[in-house]
């Protein structure tokens, strides 16, 4: 039962943290909840489909279909998160500064929401399909322990969702002045971590050289199977034994998105004034 | 908005360009294949000796009806192998040492170690 709990918890954790952070980051966008829910449902149905066709996907591209599939899903998610962050860098301040402007932002907001749907859907799809396969295996083996193991899975799911909700609730308590910096930074690190994971799958499929394997080994001091290791893995892409190529991907994505955000922030003439306006409003509220 | 779109296009081009630069580094040769079999939620052999300093092509055949996930933190690898099928995983080049792995879906019985010499 404990084994099932841990496995399901770990799979759910990654998706739940992502959803928590993205939900917080988009809290000022109208209609966000509907899109979140749609993404979640699409992801769950996708996960069931992927699990059902796991043998087909696995046998594609002479046995490396699974790695390619994972790398592509992660790659799309990285692009979407990058787009989200860059879009937020040019519009976030407007959205936060005044409810009066929301009308004009809705059209842009809808596009942003469809990004949200894809990101959430893909996260649930990837983590969910493995959980479905795992639970299917348990259900198929007719052991007497199947029901207690499934109960373990349910507890793991609940705990994972609870952690995701905690980070969401925690982020909402961050003062408005720091809020976009905080969520922007978290999304940036999520994207870089996903790029590193994508690289790992491509190395596993022998499509990329590992460069150095491993680049470092911190498995003794901070094992990836420990709770802090799991959290850091999901949040910032921590890897106890990364390949050199993973770090290359991590840094490239980190720098590209950061530069993109800076350029978008400069290109939008409104954001600077909006932000100072926002700061004034908050100072006004504080005094 | 237009400027934003142009900026985004430029940014995506740079990203794809960088990926293109990485692509030529792909071609590498593999030296030998090594086999593992999963049966009754156990690995056979439970200890597999491979040469160190070489990239290894590992072929894992799952003879059980249920799916299994080959997972090794030491090797930094994970892959789902559905029931009645085979999967390929590339590992290494490894330093000499012991690299434990498990079948995550049946961790109590499915345990093994790769020994690099």
Image (cartoon, helix red, strand yellow):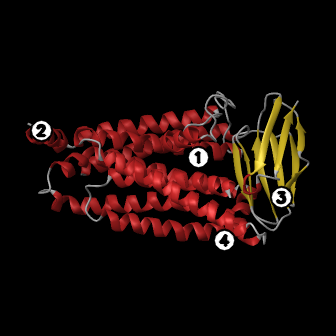
N-term-proximal mark, 1 vs 4 = 4
**Relative to residue A86, is residue A147 depicted above or below?**
below
What residue is shown with label 2? A286
Subunit of label 4: A
The residue at 12%/38% (across/down) is A286
Viewer-nearest of discs 2 and 1: 2
Label located before the other in sequence (4 or 2): 4
Measure the alpha-carbon separation of dots 3 and 2.
Answer: 63 Å
Q: CA distance from mark 4 to mark 3?
A: 21 Å
Residue in view at x 55 percent, y 68 percent: A46
How far separated are the C-alphas under marks 4 and 2?
55 Å
Residue placed most toward the observer, A258 or A130: A130
Marks 1,3: beta carbons within 8 A: no
Secondary element type, mark 1? helix
Q: Is residue A138 left or right of residue A20?
A: right
Q: Are marks 4 and 3 in contact (CB under 8 Å)?
A: no
Q: Residue at x 52, y 50 (%)?
A: A75
Depth order, front residue of B89/A44: A44
> Residue A10: x and y, percent?
59, 51
Q: For mark 4, what is the residue? A: A52
Callout 2–callout 1 Cβ contact below 8 Å: no
Q: CA distance from mark 2 to mark 1?
A: 45 Å
């Amino acid at each position: 039962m404990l084994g099932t709990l841990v496995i399901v918890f770990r799979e759910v954790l990654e998706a739940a943290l992502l959803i928590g952070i993205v939900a917080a980051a988009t809290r000022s966008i109208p209609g966000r909840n509907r899109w979140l829910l749609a993404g979640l449902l699409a992801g769950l149905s996708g996960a069931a489909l992927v699990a059902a066709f796991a043998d087909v996907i696995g046998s594609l591209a002479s046995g490396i279909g699974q790695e390619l599939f994972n790398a592509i899903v992660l790659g799309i998610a990285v692009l979407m998160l990058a787009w989200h962050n860059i879009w937020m860098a040019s519009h976030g301040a407007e959205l936060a500064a005044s409810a009066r402007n929301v009308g004009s932002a809705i059209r842009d907001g809808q596009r942003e929401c469809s990004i949200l749907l894809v990101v959430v859907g893909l996260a649930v799809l990837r983590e969910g399909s493995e959980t479905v396969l795992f639970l299917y295996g348990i259900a198929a083996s007719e052991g007497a322990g199947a029901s207690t193991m499934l109960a373990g899975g349910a507890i793991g799911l609940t705990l994972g969702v609870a952690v995701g909700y905690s980070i969401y609730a925690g982020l909402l308590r961050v003062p408005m002045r720091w809020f976009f910096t905080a969520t922007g930074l978290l999304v940036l690190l999520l994207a870089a971590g996903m790029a590193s994971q994508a690289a790992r799958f491509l190395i596993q499929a022998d499509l990329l050289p590992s460069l150095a394997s491993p680049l470092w080994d911190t498995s003794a001091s901070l094992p990836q199977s420990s709770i802090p290791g799991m959290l850091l893995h999901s949040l910032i892409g921590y890897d106890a034994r990364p390949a050199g190529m993973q770090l290359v991907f991590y840094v490239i994505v980190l720098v590209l998105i950061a530069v993109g955000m800076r350029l978008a922030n400069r290109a939008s003439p409104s954001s600077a004034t909006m932000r100072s306006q926002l700061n004034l409003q908050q100072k006004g509220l504080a005094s | 908005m237009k400027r934003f779109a142009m900026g985004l296009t430029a940014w995506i081009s740079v990203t794809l360009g960088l990926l293109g630069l990485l692509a030529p580094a792909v071609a590498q040769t593999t030296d030998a294949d090594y086999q593992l079999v999963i049966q009754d939620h156990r690995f056979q052999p439970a200890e597999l000796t491979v040469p160190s300093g070489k990239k290894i092509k590992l072929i894992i055949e799952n003879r059980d009806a249920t799916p299994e996930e080959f997972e090794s933190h030491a090797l930094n690898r994970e892959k789902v192998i559905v029931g009645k099928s085979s999967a390929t995983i590339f590992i290494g080049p490894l330093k000499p040492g012991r690299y434990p792995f498990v079948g995550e879906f049946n961790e109590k019985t499915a345990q093994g170690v790769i020994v690099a010499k």
